[in-house]
Amino acid sequence: MNYHVYMLISLSRKPVTYVGYTSDLKKRITLHNTSRGAKFTRGRKWKLIYKEKHRSKKEAISRECYIKKNRTLRNKIKKNYK
């Protein structure tokens, strides 16, 4: 089974980003946009700006953690989106 690490950006005046992992990317984004995703994402509309595929859950979790902690990388991804 493949897992995806993804980054979302909120569609608000002052955008924030969210990083997560999932095995079903389309379903997960729908959950975020209908306020049934992670608590942090509730009440906002989100757009996918980055994704990468991994072969195992362990790899995906490790990569998600790395991206979450690496502010420089998150800002670079955000900048490339704009």
Image (cartoon, rainbow, N blue to C red):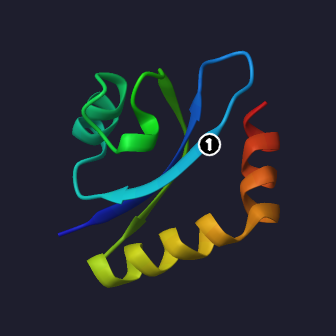
Write the residue at 39% across / 30% down: 42
The residue pinned by badge 1 equals 17
- Is residue 56 in view? no
Rendered view: 65 above or below 32: below
Left or right of 11 on screen, residue 4? left
Left or right of 77 on screen, residue 28? left
Write the residue at 72% across / 56% down: 74
**From the image, which quarter does the C terminus lie in?**
top right
Secondary element under disc 1, as helix, strand or loop, is: strand
Q: Residues within 10 Å of mark 1 (few under 14, many from 20)?
A: some
Which residue of the protein is positioned furthest toward the left in this rendering?
1
Which residue of the protein is positioned furthest toward the top in this rendering?
13
Left or right of 44 on screen, residue 33? left
Q: Nearer the viewer, residue 31 or 35?
A: 35
Total numbered labels placed on residues in the image: 1
How far across and how far down the image is residue 23, in percent? 23, 58
